[in-house]
Amino acid sequence: MTEPESASANQSQSELINEEDPDACLEHDSFGAEQIAAATELSGFEDDGEADEDLFEELERLRESGFATVDEDDADDGGGGLGGGSETAWRIDLETALLDDECDFGTVRNICRGRAVPGHLRAQVWSICLGAASGGARAASLLDEFDGLFDLPEQAELRAACRDFVRDWDAGGGEGGVAMQSDLESMLTHYCKLTGRKFLPVVRALLQLPQQPPQQQQPSTRALFPMFSALLTKYTPRPEPACHVFRLLLQYHEPALSSLLDSLRLPVADFASDWMAGLLARDLATEVLHPLWDMYFLLADPFLLLFIGLVFVVNCKESLLAPDVDAESVRRMLSTTPSALGVADVADLCTLAQHYACRTPASLRTLFTAALFGDAEPDADLLMALCLPVTVAEVTRDPPFTLVDVRSPDMYNRGHLAGAYNLDSGLLLSRPTEFDSALAAVVRTANGPLCVSGHGRKEEDTTTVLVAAQLLRRLCPGVSIFPGEDDEEDETEELVSVSTWQRDALSSYPCSLLLGDDNQQTPGYLIIREQHMYLLRLCPKQPGMAAIVVRRPLVKVRLPEFITLKYGDTDKDGVTHLTDMDRVVIPKAGEATKDVKMQIIKLLGGVSPQQ
């Protein structure tokens, strides 16, 4: 990251004043300026001079939540601030608040307002942000459950790492260093047995926290473990799914860079897995890492790490897209990018990470929180997603997307979301030239990220994925897709054996069920038993099994006068399409239906009508 050429130039170019706090400002150094240039191309739909203005308005809104310039004089002692105003006043307020046993996260966040926490208060603030203060007793008690056996497969490696770390920490070689090494190895061994994961870089960053009072420079293991446990539980994602989600984010915002990595066969994990597993602890100097973690914990956004990584990659965009790059040079470049981050860059880095977060569908958090931070096995379908999936709820609530409905024109005309473009996916295979022209027109007229929608049933949405792939091949930014949802429905519906139900039924009739708003025909059975009638929907992925979609009692028919009139037509293939329906209650229902039927027969010239 380059240093700013001059403070005055920066201030005249991009100083943003908070109307509520005239003393607070946000100055962008050259690192921020490069990112602003890249971020203006984020959506792929802005090509005029208004893009910079829009981005600066976004940055001002984000800054009002607390981001500002690092005070270089204060940064040297680890207590620098990222906010303007009276440095002394807010620090006094923070110290006073921390003296109160009832001090909570909201109080700390309102006082800090995104500024770097003073070094001597950092341990207390982090403990509150991580919830270790309230849950520390239970976490600390886990240490009492340690079996005292140092028998991990990697125990020798872990012991050597602890010894090397303590040697750097306690250069004098005192007794305190020996005790620290023992405690550190016990804590790591116990946690690795509980979770099966290694997090020495995170421990290193925590151990370098000055304590209160200042004379107590070495935190006790019992005080450290609750923060360690909370940090890993709340903010450290699983590396493998985190790298997959990171790839989806890179593809969504920077498809050209994602395509480059694919062409070089360079997995994201080759350069980003250490970022995710260690929260950048092994990549950044302590004086940079601590202010960055201040922002991470005060924003309370576990996904911020992914967007910080995205900013790192975008910062290398020009070099990455240069000719004659190879996989090893790209891996080396990206792996070492965080090490160039300086203390003065932290504010811009977090602001730009939030900028990308604001431009990313909220479905990311809805769909992937459990996969990244939960205990259950991640959903395999999500981890195999071609592009970023979004939920129907987000699209229908207040869509910022350009919707591309790939169903047939007939189905599209029966009903679709407002503003959706119709792009018949059937043309992709039958008339590819016509499809390419239609796709180009959609891309050209789009006024927002492109979201591809289809039937919502996986077995029928193969072409939906193909359309999304075509958009990705064109390097269109902001491509997302509706995931299929029938697997979730199968989990909630009762599944039965078709052969067993046919054997126990009074009557059984194969039929086509008309399901959904588009009356999609689905194979099924009508089953009649002594007291009930059932409609079963066959499950394509489980031969011989069916889901019960309708269960009607036969002994509780209380309205024989209730009749349903359905209207429609039959196409040349013999498929019936319903167009309308009426329900009425008629005292003489039998006579009425007979008269309607006879009139239809008369109009059709004596031919028995199909409808």
Image (spheres, helix red, strand yellow):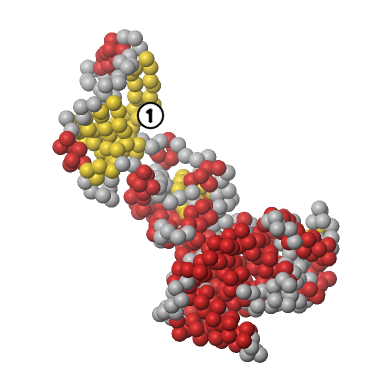
- Res 312 → quadrant: bottom right
Residue at 41 percent of width and 57 percent of height = 379
In this rendering, the answer to whether 189 lies above or below 17 is below
Query: Which corner quadrant of the image does residue 183 belong to?
Result: bottom right
Viewer-closest of 74 and 595 = 74
> Does residue 197 appear left or right of residue 82 in this picture?
left
Q: Going by the image, does 269 lie left or right of 447?
A: left
Query: Is residue 161 visible in this depiction of the protein?
Result: yes
- Relative to the observer, which residue lies in front, 258 or 491? 491
Tell me the SS state at disc 1.
strand
Question: 291 or 205: which is nearer to us?
Answer: 205
Name the spot of residue 136 as percent of width and height, x first: 59, 63
In the image, residue 346 lies at what x, y percent?
Answer: 69, 70
Given the image, on which type of amino acid does mark 1 rest? Thr
Q: Residues within 10 Å of mark 1 (few under 14, many from 20)?
A: few
Residue bearing the label numbered 1:
579
Q: Is residue 281 visible?
A: no
Q: Quadrant of the C terminus?
A: top left
Q: Residue at x 35, y 30 (%)?
A: 578
Q: How many numbered dots are placed on residues in this image?
A: 1
Residue 594: image quadrant is: top left
Residue drawn at the location 70% of the way across and 55% of the way down: 102
Q: Position of residue 547 (x, y in %)?
A: 29, 41
Q: Residue furthest front?
A: 144
Q: Position of residue 99 (x, y in %)?
A: 75, 61
In the picture, which quadrant includes the N terminus?
bottom right
